[in-house]
Image (cartoon, rainbow, N blue to C red):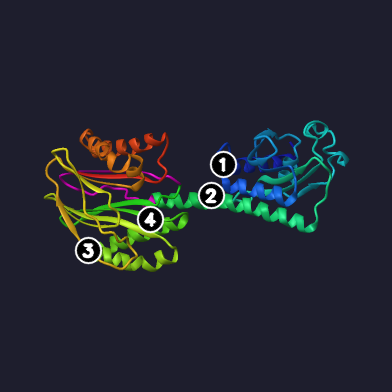
Amino acid sequence: MTIEAVGTLETELRRQSAVEALEILDTAPEDRFDRITRMAQQLFGVPMVSITLLDDDRQWRKSHLGLTREAPRADSFCDLTVRTDSPVIIGDTTADDRFRDNPFVAGDPHLRFYAGEPIHAPGGEAVGTLCVVDTEPRTLTGGEQRLLRDLADWVQAELDRDEELDRTAVVQRALLPRRKPAARGYDVAAACEPGERIAGDFYDWYDTDGGFTVTVGDVVGTGSPIAIIAASVRAALRSATAFAELEPAVAEASRMIEEELDRLAAYTSVFHARIDGDGLVRFVDAGHGLAFVVRATGDIERLETSTLPLGIAGERPEHSVSLGAGEALLVISDAVFDALGGEAGLGVLQSRVRGSATSAGAVSRIVGAARDEHGAAPVGDALAILVRRD
């Protein structure tokens, strides 16, 4: 094998690894990509547009108009665009020695014009194209060529955004508590399934004097900013709780992140509680409103809440409730509450808690029940945390 052939093989292996790392092959259509192909079709007045990724021996199209979902890669226009890693514009395919005998030129759909721009993975590897295709010969002006490059950059920005969200999700998962609190006399567990890669809901727990602290929060917003806010809220509450009682700690945490929340046009609801060894639960519910006590009698009680989430000036009073032997504190996300039918689903929560031997089993069954109601993961973040007194 020649040095040139070795270099070509290495480039192809890197390219294939990069396209697989995107984790986009064979995924469902998405409007953020379909919007680009619709715009390209209108701007260039062509019958066929495609956002194409090359996978081994096939062309797979994330978004397409006038074309099939996939086609052979060998001797294709897009393969040439990726291999040369440069724009390819063929004004009349029947006059091009490379493609006049191509089956898609000689036969249906009798392609006559092709213009493609390479699309790159975050590491710089050419992995696909944005292309416009016509059944009539034509040319592109310099302005149209720049427009096609701008649209390809838009596709690439969407792929880069996916990479950013993946990295953010990894960091966010790393921020979840790794160890349970000592919590003597209690069985504590949580289950969390993000509806998207970046979860707006989060939880935290840690030991404090005479017991332990539990926090559940919900950041309302989208994308990477919600992960930043969730981390900020978690850090602010941990810091403030170390030297203050619950009510002033929540007030201080709210003050610390008020500017950040305002700048990002987001807000955060929080349930923040300290649980003592004797069963006393002191809590501040800042607009969360989805905390319950499941009694030994089978009754389920919804705890009091303030209507003010963090970042809004106002009072958030402390409340308390006592857990007897076998009784449990349950806090869930709004996605779980809505998926189970709101107030009508409280019986499901009660039965899952009382019918499970462990807290881990209960929260898993609660999140599973919410998921089953939709036949898939809930629309939003599914979270449940349970503190049961032995």
Q: Amino acid at mark 1?
A: Ile
Residue 359 locus on image (x, y percent)? 24, 39
Q: Give how far apart the Cα atoms at labels 1 and 3 are.
A: 46 Å
Q: Residues within 10 Å of mark 1 (few under 14, many from 20)?
A: few
Residue under the image location 38 percent in, 37 percent down: 371
Q: Which residue is mark 3?
A: 247
Residue under the image location 16 percent in, 46 percent down: 184
Q: Give how far apart the Cα atoms at labels 1 and 4 are.
A: 27 Å
Q: Give how far apart the Cα atoms at labels 2 and 3 are.
A: 39 Å
Q: Callout 2: helix, strand or loop? A: helix
Residue under the image location 26 percent in, 40 percent down: 346
Q: Callout 1: helix, strand or loop? A: loop
User: In the displayed structure, does residue 112 sit left or right of residue 323?
Assistant: right
Q: Which residue is mark 4?
A: 219
Q: Residues within 10 Å of mark 3 (few under 14, many from 20)?
A: some
Magenta stretch? 174-196
Furthest-front residue in this view: 344
